[in-house]
Amino acid sequence: MDLGKLNILVVEDDSDTQNRIVREFNSLNFSTTTASSFYEAKTIIQNSANNFDLFLIDIQLPDGDGFSLISEIRNINKDALLIIMTGYINNKIIDKSNKIDCYEVIQKPFSIKNDIIPLAKKCLKNIYLKKENDYLNAQILHISKLAALGELSATVVHDIRGPLTMIQLTCEDIKDEMKKTENNESFENNLTSHLSQITRACHKINKLVDHLRNYSRKDVQEVEESKSVIELIENSIFLVKQKIRNYSIKVEIKIDEKYNNAELICYPNKFEQILMNLMSNACDAMKESKKKELKIKAYLDENTFNISVNDTGSGIPEVVIPKIFDSFFTTKPKGEGTGLGLSIVKNIVKEHLGDLVLSSVVGEGTTFTIKLPISKLVIKASSEGGPSPSRAA
């Protein structure tokens, strides 16, 4: 497991202090970058703030305010740890540092070995644990995706068998036509029709294989991109199709008409994992229900764009709701769940700057709502022949 190097940016205009800090950090095998002025630091932050785990910022720089640098850092790297260095401490500095969630404020003069190094070690221990946790969560997420693909095996067989049967029958029709044909023009017309059927069947198989391959890959290198909201929802429904068939569940997708061609700025693979997990849980909740309806809705509510997944299952008791997003907590019978699902889902939603909200009524059903900033939504102009904003599957 390679967690990468732990990197530090030191912003300090006093060259002697800067050199002593760097010397001590280098002796501990820390990777250290330095800046001696406000504008030098600003350039480094704007270009590579995400490359640093810890920032030591002198807030009294000759050409600018260190707090402005910290605001730049927070806009780009919200998880970075910050240590403020200052010649004097007052209530105003303490208040500002608390608001921007600084790890520590340390007053000059200080001892590098006795003050800075112990703080840095504490910070870097937290960073290492977070990186390790992120790594393990990524592994768990990938394993859960592979487990979902295992459940899809029956669906894959069914969806591939149909197009393959069509190809086989069409090829037999072509052979029969070749044997009995006397009219070249008629044969050519029939051949063109048969070849079109084969092409369509091959396209279906290729689309299925591509989707499975994309879903099964690891998400480490995935980047945000604009993806059709409808496509994200329908791809996720595909991943739970077997449960929908087995439990005879009616599926309804409802999207406000003006968002019918909307796209979402997201990590597509991860976002489909969110929806698939919520839909899979909804299907499981309706396993024994008389009424089995899965409703997926996309709509705008005040300042958020929402995607909700609603089921008509047994609902979640009030006593359970506070624990529902805890790691390793599950309401499923022994051997049927790890309890990792909703915890992972909540973390991925947060990664998209959103929130996951639960509402449930025992005996009536449950709704999970993904609430995302409007800034994540891209409205596309309507095009003729697009999918209907409300339909059932």
Image (cartoon, rainbow, N blue to C red):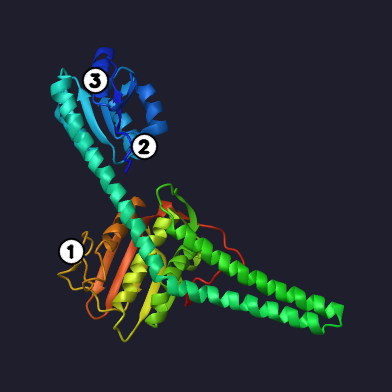
Amino acid type, residue under disc 1 in the picture: Pro
Q: Nearer the viewer, residue 59 or 78?
A: 78
Q: Position of residue 139 (x, y in %)?
A: 33, 53
Marks 3 and 1, Cα distance to the nearest angstrom? Answer: 46 Å
- Mark 1 lies on a secondary structure that is helix
Q: Position of residue 319 (x, y in %)?
A: 14, 70
Q: Is residue 3 left or right of residue 85?
A: right
Q: Residue at x 33, y 41 (%)?
A: 2
Q: Position of residue 303 (x, y in %)?
A: 36, 56
Disc on the earlier residue, 1 or 2: 2
User: Does residue 18 show up?
Assistant: yes
Front of the two marks 3 and 1: 3
CB under 8 Å between discs 2 and 3:
no
Q: Against 247, is 336 above or below?
A: above
- Mark 3 lies on a secondary structure that is helix
Q: Which residue is mark 1?
A: 322
Q: Which residue is mark 2?
A: 50
Q: Nearer the viewer, residue 156 or 77?
A: 156
Amino acid type, residue under disc 3 in the picture: Ile
- Mark 2 lies on a secondary structure that is helix
Q: Quadrant of the N terminus?
A: top left
Q: Residue at x 34, y 51 (%)?
A: 351
User: Does residue 386 show up?
Assistant: no
Q: Against 240, is 101 above or below?
A: above
Q: Which residue is mark 3?
A: 21
Front of the two marks 1 and 2: 2
Q: Label 1: how many residues lie within 10 Å, few (<14), some (14-19) or many (20+)?
A: few
Q: Position of residue 123 (x, y in %)?
A: 21, 35
Disc on the earlier residue, 2 or 3: 3
